[in-house]
Image (cartoon, rainbow, N blue to C red):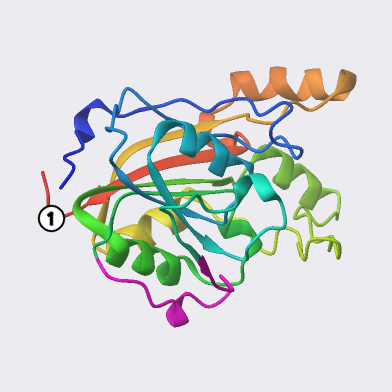
Amino acid sequence: MVVLSHSSVEILPEWGVGLFPDSTGGLLVRRLKPPPSTNVLDVGPHVLTTRLRRLYDKVDSLGINPPDEYVQPRWNEQHFEQDLSDFGSVTLPSHSYDLIVCCGVVEHIPSLPREWMGFFGRMMRPDGLLVIETPNGAALKNRLMMLAGVQPYHCKERPENGDKGHIREWTKREILEAARDSGLRLVRYLCVNDIVHPGLAGRIYRWVQAVLPAGLRDDMYFVFGRADLP
């Protein structure tokens, strides 16, 4: 079993220019230093999977298998084909993974936080870690758009890849409550502006956000461990 030191986790969002077409945040764990033999599950495989495979010898994936050849499983890896809209139907061996990474996924599925948090909790080994990145449902931009009568979620279907857009963006409180109910505890949290808004309006927006509470920023990063461990 790989032992991961929860006390040494530092969150670091990586700017995704060139690798993430939608400017999604990249892998965010630094100074964790898990060994290459760490057993990893990447939920919702996409370009981030290639980053994980630079760090780890074996990265399994869960979700709808993307057509891109460069994120296909390597010889020693498994891809579990599963519609993530129903985590209750996912059947994987419990307590199988040291590290579960779920970035840019939960906002695209209709499942409730207690459903996917419960699943992640069952999949984690006792000393494992769960990394989640998702947009902040309480971000300043969402509040401003709602005031203007505009739907803030990106509910725009992309038929070429089956993406239905952001079905729901969650708040920190909702995710923490679901984690607690699933036997998980927060190890680290960070709320940042991971997407650069262009133009003069974007510069004004970034300046305003810089002087407002961090909880109004655009993107949330969580690292969870099991609550039954110190």
Inspect the magenta stretch and tell me whether residue 90 lies in it: yes
Farthest residue, direction front: 75
Name the element at disc 1.
loop
User: 128 or 142, which lies in front?
Assistant: 128
Measured from the top left, where is residue 167 in percent x and y?
69, 64
Q: In this view, does 117 lie to the left or right of 95?
A: right
Which image quarter is the C terminus in?
A: top left
Inspect the magenta stretch and tell me whether residue 209 lies in it: no
Picture quadrant of residue 20: top right
Name the chief secondary structure element in magenta: loop
Residue at 12% x, 55% y: name it: 228
Residues shaded magenta:
80-94
Q: Is residue 133 above or below residue 9?
A: below
Q: Is residue 111 left or right of residue 93?
A: right
Q: Is residue 38 left or right of residue 40?
A: left
On the image, numbered disc 1 is attached to which residue? Answer: 228
Measured from the top left, where is residue 209 in percent x and y?
65, 25
Residue at 43% x, 55% y: name it: 77
Picture quadrant of residue 5: top left
Picture quadrant of residue 81: bottom right
User: 42 or 199, which lies in front?
Assistant: 42
Amino acid type, mark 1: Asp
Residue at 45% x, 60% y: name it: 78
